[in-house]
Image (cartoon, rainbow, N blue to C red):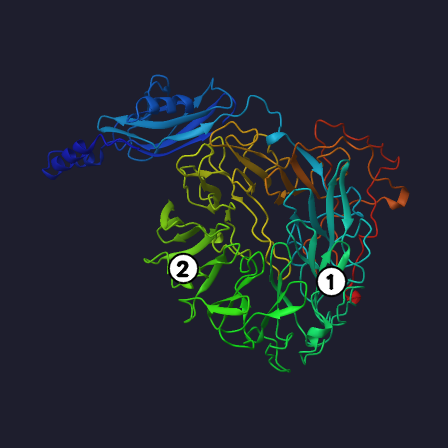
Amino acid sequence: MRKATSTAFAAAVLAAGALGLLPGAALAAGPPQVVSVTVEAVTASSAVLRGQANPNGLTTTFRFEYLSEAAYQANLKAEPSSDGFKGAALAPANGAGFVGSGTSTAPVSQQLSKLAASTTYRYRLVVKNSAGEDQSAVSAFATQAATNAFNLLDGRAWEMVSPLDKGGGSIPPPATLFGGGDFQASASGEQVTFSSPFSFAGGVGAPPLSQYLAIRSSSGWQTQNLSPPLLSGSYGDHPDGAPYRLFSADLSRGLLSNGERCRGNAGGECPVANPPLPGSGAPAGFRDYYLRSGSGFASLLSTAALNNTDRTSAEFELTLAGATPDLAHVVLSSCAALTGDATEVPPPGDCSAAAQNLYAWSGSGLVALNFLPGETSTTPGAELAAQGGAISTDGSRAYFTLGGALYLREGNTTKLLPETSGGGAAFQITSADGAIAYFTKGSHLYRYSASAQTSTDLTPAGGVLGVLGASADASHVYYATTAGLFGWNAGTSSEISPGPISAANYSPTAATGTAHLSADGAHLLFSSTASLTGYPNSGKAELYLYGPPKSGGAARLLCVSCKPTGETARGSASVPGTVPNGTTLIYRPRVMSAGGSRVFFESEDSLSVQDTNNRRDVYEWEALGEGTCVVDPGCVQLISAGRSSQPSTFIDASADGSSAFFLTDESLVSTDPGSTDIYVARTGGGYPSPPGGIHCDGDACQVLPGAPDDPTPGTQVPGSANPPVHFPKAHKKPHKPKKGKGKKKTHKGKGNRKRGRAAR
């Protein structure tokens, strides 16, 4: 807060000038002005404070005032009406550094020394001349720890999840190969599934992307290849993701595609080339999806369902529209009639969006959904309201769109949502039980009650730009307007921050939007390029967490990705949204623990003294009182190593945040020979280092190839060898054979093979 000490002086100067009593040059003279203030080069015991000020034509002095956060808060507690700087130290010590007497901005700086390590300080810049004084807003910085020792929060330890032997391959990041990849951790953190273009761990199929499941045991992570037999070749003439589209929350079930029609036959009509999986009951040649449970596969499409359609396997299409988190209920879309009450646009109709029917699968065949109220046969042209968040968890309610209106299918009844009949409504999200839904129309946000069959306008003034999310019981909803970001709860809207936020936060469905909510809706995580908490982010995107503090009290807004030292941001922070997997956009990685006390994110900035690689790294923010954090309002520390030659990528986390999975090419255990692997930073984790690495002899040893860069299906782009392996200081570097004595290289196995277009 700036002091206004020169109003009378300025008025006097203006009056004198108007009367001609002062020369023209004096009209420019006046109180000084603080333009900016920042902190740099923060160490455990020192920091450099910098600022810019305009003397406004009079000789001006400056001083930085600073004191510890504890002293600042104690001052405010003792005297609430004070500015909190009683007893503050000065820099320079005499409190009268020279700014100048010009009329343009001039820089000022002071180096502070003898600071306490791991301590937060408050500071401000004060400038003064004969016409008055000005001061900056109060800012903060935190000194580094007294040691550079690298310790993960909560006593975490790294564990290598993907196997040492990957057939000479690696684990490329999600969405970099064939338009997708399925990466997902179980809610418990004891399992994780991932995709790779390389086949290893006993694979019996050869799809473009093999799927793996890693399970934690007492002796280490064990990986199994989930790729089924007989599925091979590419899945279309364009990148179309991994065969596995989605997994249940506990990874016990998986949903996969049997492949596209007409592989390599552009413009033609032909059946699916892959034969049915044994024991699945799938009809041959038809586009289909399989549900994997245990080691068995079941077809979602039955021969009996095909008795209702005139379309042949060469004309037939089927698309995954949505599913419940446990995959017990799946919604499919097709232009074909798959039930006796479904209406089909007869061939040679083109199966366009205007001809689609919706079908629900719950383990006992298909049931049509897209009935208009009171009708006994379906009306084609329906779409599920969203791939994620439009079906209740028990599958009893599903929202769909038809003709621009929104409908709820509940049991055998269809209800039109009020206020949507004229079209233009956009579905947002539903509660877990489907009883409450939110939608927007004409810049208004509506709350729909299935029991009352009413739609209530929550924003009569309009101006809604987007919705960020809602709690599982729909009691909380967050939305952005032209005036700012707001939260609605129990009939009351509250402002969270003024001004616009990034549109990337909008839409709570899993298809788009990067905002995240805790299950109870009390915590909201979102991104913004605006400085919402006063941190000098320089237009870089930062992550903000809104919610009540750990000790209770009023809700507050925190920047969880801002530099703890308070230094100006040099790179943006982000959290992953839904990773596209072909046409499937449903699963969004967990980046926030269920209670909102832990957040995992990626940052292009160095937020820790151990982060030295100038690459994107994975970080954790943890609230005061959670785990090992004793700093208010929270602690920030690396999850990845901060030394990798390539960017690290966050994959997923367990529901409680005790396990955080990430991709890195850094060797974080002594037996990792290099390549990009999945690691987990696990609370209470870590294994004794196993002996040895991968054995190979003579010509069987080949250099690891670089990760392909989104190649065309059926090809593999060759790359250079991985950079040298870097081992943690806690482990000795393995013995390096002398030149010419059979230098060990990594075996390139069967998985590293070219798959030509002819294989389609």
> Neighbour class for label 1 at 10 Å: few (<14), some, many (≥20)?
some
Residue 317 placement (x, y as % from top left): 66, 72
Above or below, comparing residue 45 to residue 438 in the picture: above
Q: Secondary structure at mark 1?
A: strand
Which numbered marker is on residue 298?
A: 1
**Residue 740 falls left or right of residue 51:** right
Residue 460: quadrant of the picture: bottom left
Q: Which residue is mark 2?
A: 446
Q: Earlier in the sequence, mark 2 or mark 1?
A: 1
Tell me the quadrant of the picture where the N terminus can be found: top left
Tell me the quadrant of the picture where the C terminus can be found: bottom right
- Residue 487 versus residue 265: which sits nearer the camera? 487
Which numbered marker is on residue 235?
A: none
- Residue 376 versus residue 488: which sits nearer the camera? 376
Q: How many marks?
A: 2
Residue 716 placement (x, y as % from top left): 75, 56
Q: Residue 85: in sight, yes or no?
A: no
Q: Secondary structure at mark 2?
A: strand
The structure residue drawn at horizontal position 66% and vertical position 50%, both measured from the top left corner, is 183
